[in-house]
Image (spheres, rainbow, N blue to C red):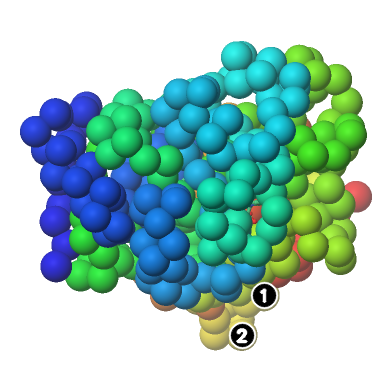
């Protein structure tokens, strides 16, 4: 049975129910500023194992641990470098995750067998209050079945998990819409493992040069450091094709492709950034990087419901939040992109 708790801001009495479930080793889905998380006590191996089972997640893909105050970081990480303190000061709570050497008490189940641990402090009052009230650090991957688009609303979570987890906290739609930025602080210079809600340019303003892992733009091969990178992700049922390049050329090319696929008898969906397309299904993600990020995963889920065979997506520039957006789009496309000159 799944209890659904509606809450726009933390409500002490309702939150107690969810916090007690966490303490009992149960699964609670909750909103963060990025996407919804599927949470369990990070130090309880059995509870964490249930997250992997529920999601159908490969056991070597580690989870992010969520904390509510900076001191908690010292209980999870063995070594907290100066960069972590400076970045946390500036960006926590917020969409930035650090990878650091783990302490012994953090179970290998949580870290996917790695000696490092990923930690972040989410900028969402409901999430923070759940962590505080449960008195536990909370491991939470995105609350979607493994391989599906991440959930940006409680409805998305319910679509994947209703009846299979103990609780869903419905706190409305998430603001950012793409997951946190994952930064490996065990290397010098630090390495960006996953672009996300905090643009890497913002991080570089504070700590200087950050290396971009080649997987981020889709060139990856060695994925030992971030096992998450090797799995196909965000995949809707339809085939996704990203069209990149100069705006006008992209527009023309997509119109051409709509025609081509429809003549083959296929249903075509388009994800656009401010332009109208006459296709079987059309979603406008918005003009700004922020809007596109916020609407991306919802659009993938919606187009799936329209039963389209092909999704044509307009690419955007890989800067600011655009790097995170393009990373998700390329993954959804299985790296099938058309680059126009
Ligand atoms: O915004 C977010 O980060 C959301 C919300 C719920 O906080 N969570 C999230 O979790 O996106 P998940 O499990 O879907 O993604 C975690 C990512 C994966 O790519 C994983 O491989 C990476 O973080 N990761 C976790 N621990 C790691 C570690 N020790 N070393 C390298 N990468 C790690
Ligand atoms: Mg995920």
Q: Name the residue rendered at 22%, 27% in the picture.
A: 9
Q: Say which residue label 1 marks.
A: 260
Q: Name the residue rendered at 32%, 45% in the picture.
A: 30
- Quadrant containing the N terminus in the rendered view: bottom left
Q: Is residue 128 visible?
A: yes
Numbered mark located on residue 45 in the image: none
Q: Name the residue rendered at 72%, 67% in the picture.
A: 230
Percent from the top left, x then y, of residue 256? 70, 64
SS under mark 2: loop
The relative height of residue 141 versus residue 198 in the rendered view (above or below) is below
Percent from the top left, x then y, of residue 13? 9, 33
For the residues marked 2 and 1, what is the alpha-carbon distance in whole angstroms?
7 Å
Q: Name the residue rendered at 54%, 63% in the picture.
A: 109
Percent from the top left, x then y, of residue 278? 51, 58
Image quarter of residue 31: top left
Percent from the top left, x then y, of residue 137? 42, 41
The relative height of residue 59 versus residue 290 in the rendered view (above or below) is below
Q: Residues within 10 Å of mark 2 (few under 14, many from 20)?
A: few
Does ligand 2 reach within 8 Å of label 1's beta carbon? no
**Are dots 2 and 1 in contact, CB under 8 Å?**
yes
Q: Is residue 300 visible?
A: no
The relative height of residue 197 versus residue 264 in the rendered view (above or below) is above
Numbered mark located on residue 264 in the image: 2
Relative placement, left or right, of 231 versus 305 is right
Relative placement, left or right, of 16 versus 103 is left
């Amino acid at each position: 049975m799944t209890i659904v708790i509606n809450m726009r801001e933390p409500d002490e009495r309702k939150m107690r129910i969810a916090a007690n479930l966490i303490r009992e080793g149960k699964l609670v889905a909750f909103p963060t500023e990025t996407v919804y998380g599927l949470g369990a006590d990070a130090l309880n191996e059995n509870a964490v194992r249930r997250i992997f089972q529920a999601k159908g997640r490969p056991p070597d893909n580690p989870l992010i641990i969520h904390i509510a105050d900076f001191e908690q970081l010292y209980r999870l990480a063995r070594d907290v470098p100066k960069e972590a303190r400076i970045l946390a000061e500036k960006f926590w709570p917020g969409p930035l995750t650090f990878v650091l050497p783990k302490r012994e008490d953090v179970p290998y189940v949580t870290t996917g067998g790695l000696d490092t641990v990923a930690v972040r402090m989410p900028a969402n009052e409901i999430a923070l209050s759940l962590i505080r009230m449960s008195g536990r650090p909370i491991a939470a991957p995105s609350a979607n079945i493994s391989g599906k688009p991440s959930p940006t609303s409680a409805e998305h979570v319910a679509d994947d998990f209703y009846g299979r987890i103990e609780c869903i906290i419905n706190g409305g739609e998430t603001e950012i819409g793409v997951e946190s930025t994952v930064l490996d602080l065990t290397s010098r210079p630090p390495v960006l493992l996953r672009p996300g809600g905090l643009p890497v340019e913002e991080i570089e303003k504070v700590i200087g040069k950050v290396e971009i892992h080649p997987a981020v733009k889709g060139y990856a091969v060695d994925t030992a450091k971030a096992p998450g990178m090797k799995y196909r992700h965000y995949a809707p049922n339809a085939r996704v094709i990203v069209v990149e390049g100069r705006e006008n050329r992209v527009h023309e090319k997509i119109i051409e492709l709509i025609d081509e696929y429809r003549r083959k008898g296929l249903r075509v969906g388009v994800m656009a950034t401010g332009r109208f397309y006459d296709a079987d299904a059309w979603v406008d993600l918005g003009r700004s990087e922020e809007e596109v990020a916020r609407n991306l995963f919802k659009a993938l889920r919606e187009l799936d419901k329209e039963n389209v065979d092909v999704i044509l997506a307009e690419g955007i520039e890989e800067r600011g939040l655009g790097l995170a957006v393009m990373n998700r789009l390329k993954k959804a496309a299985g790296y099938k992109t058309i680059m126009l000159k």
